[in-house]
Image (spheres, rainbow, N blue to C red):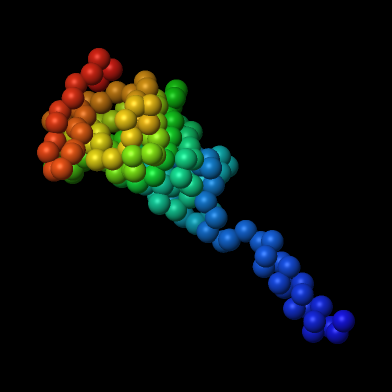
């Protein structure tokens, strides 16, 4: 085999075995001290916002964990996902009037779990959480989550109609 053939064979083998540069992961971390930039997401190099991790780092069905208490910004969820802030005082705040803190726009088969979060509308957000998609329970789960200072806690949108639902866990 010639030197050129060996080089080409090595490059082909490397290309076939290499992971894509934008490979998504199943678990990523955020921190109030993190930075939304390429390469973030590990506990030693966390990202800053839930939305950045959702859009750029985490695979469908993955989990985003908060390392500390901070405001991680509003998020629109379009895939199966768990967001966990247990014991950290992780917050999702929406300071913009007429907007939602969390919008779930996932498919009916996507499971979305929100656990250990404080969702704050800062007195101006329309909704704490809007379920535009995502399947019925157990595909949607809220656990140890507090919603406050919003016009409506939970809204389920169906055909552009919004219905308000109040539950025991909503404060």
From where the camera sits, is residue 44 visible?
Answer: yes
Horizontal relation, residue 119 to residue 15: left or right: left
Q: Position of residue 157 (x, y in %)?
A: 18, 38
Which quarter of the figure is the C terminus placed in? top left
Q: What is the residue that sits farthest to the top in this orientation?
A: 168
- The residue at 20%/34% (across/down) is 156
Residue positioned 46% across, 45% down in the render: 60
Give the farthest residue toward the right.
1
- Residue 91 appears in view: no
Q: Position of residue 39 (x, y in %)?
A: 54, 54
Picture coordinates of residue 158, whole percent (x, y): 18, 39
In which quadrant of the rendered view does residue 5 lie? bottom right
Residue at 28% over, 17% down:
169
Q: Would residue 162 appear left or right of 107 to someone viewing this image? A: left
Give the quadrant of residue 1: bottom right
Picture residue at 66% right of the left edge, 61% below the top:
18
Horizontal relation, residue 7 to residue 130: left or right? right
Q: Quadrant location of residue 96?
A: top left
């Amino acid at each position: 085999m010639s030197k050129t053939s060996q080089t080409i064979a090595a490059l082909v083998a490397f290309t076939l075995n290499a992971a894509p540069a934008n490979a998504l992961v199943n678990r990523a971390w955020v921190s109030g001290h993190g930075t939304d930039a390429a390469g973030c997401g590990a506990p030693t190099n966390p990202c800053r916002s839930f939305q950045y991790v959702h859009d750029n780092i985490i695979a469908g069905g993955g989990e985003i964990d908060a390392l500390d208490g901070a405001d991680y910004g509003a998020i629109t969820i379009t895939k199966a996902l768990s967001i966990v802030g247990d014991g950290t005082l992780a917050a999702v705040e929406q300071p913009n009037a007429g907007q939602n803190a969390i919008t779930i726009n996932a498919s009916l088969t996507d499971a979305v779990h929100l656990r250990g979060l404080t969702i704050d509308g800062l007195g101006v957000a329309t909704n704490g959480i809007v379920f535009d998609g995502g399947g019925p329970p157990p595909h949607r789960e809220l656990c140890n989550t507090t919603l406050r200072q919003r016009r409506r806690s939970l809204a389920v949108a169906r055909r552009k109609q919004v219905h308000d639902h109040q539950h025991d866990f909503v404060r």
